[in-house]
Amino acid sequence: MRAFTRESGVVAPLDRVDVDTDQIIPKQFLKRIERTGFGQFAFFDWRFREDGSLNPSFELNDAAYAGASILVAGRNFGCGSSREHAPWALEDFGVRAVIAPSFADIFFNNCFKNGMLPIVLPEESVNELLARAKERPGYKLTVDLESQTISDEEGAVANFDVDPFRKQLLLNGIDDIGLTLQHEGAIARHEATMPARLRGLTTAAT
């Protein structure tokens, strides 16, 4: 998993509430077995018209937000089904941090497991960031996980809270598998003490 320490980038404003995972990555694109390549399908039904051309009315299609790595959105972001493909699609689309007043729990947890930082700020603060990004296309923010601060070129904008354990995992790029592998030696020693018949079952399972 890619570590998250500090991200400076253009802010993309998605001033919508209840953005669900089927909008983030529509169900017809869940057939892929890789974890990469989903970015081209992110927000597909909003980004494209029926003829495949870009929809100019969709805010993220504005050239001013091209390459944006910080997404600011309305409350209850990531609601709907629990597909882990949603953070995969956003990350592959170039998003490293999402700022919103609230998130759906499963999406929120999946972000940390995939190297993305979800940040909860008061709705008033989020609305201010949305307004700045709309009024000043190309508006940039710097998100610093170590100091838990968000700043722009004019100075500090906000502080945010993050669970200390999740923070350390994200800073070090450690996902659930990596966390388990930190105990690889202990696991191997335990397996060595198991009866041969059980070791055989373990080997077969892997």
Image (cartoon, grey):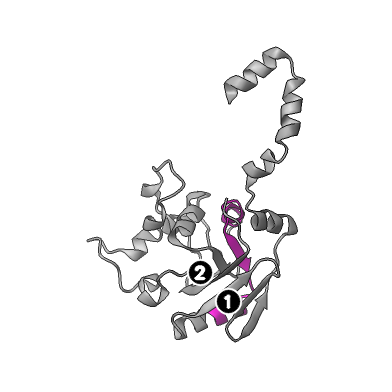
Compared across the picture, whether 33 is left or right of 130 comes to left
Q: Is residue 134 above or below residue 201?
A: below
* Residue that lies at the very extreme toward the left in this rendered image: 51
Determine the image quadrant of residue 55.
bottom left
Q: Residues within 10 Å of mark 1 (few under 14, many from 20)?
A: many
Q: Quadrant of the C terminus?
A: top right
User: Is 3 placed above or below 12 here?
Assistant: above
Examine the rendered structure and indicate whether residue 3 appears above or below residue 183: below
Membership of 118 in magenta stretch: yes
The magenta segment: 106-129
On residue 126, which mark appears?
A: 1
Q: CA distance from mark 1 to mark 2?
A: 11 Å
Secondary structure beneath disc 2? strand
Q: Is residue 78 magenta?
A: no
Please tell me which residue lies in front, 129 or 197: 197
Q: Which mark is residue 142?
A: none
- Residue at far front of view: 185
Which numbered disc covers residue 71?
2
| Camera sees residue 35 | yes
Residue 58 found in image quarter: bottom left
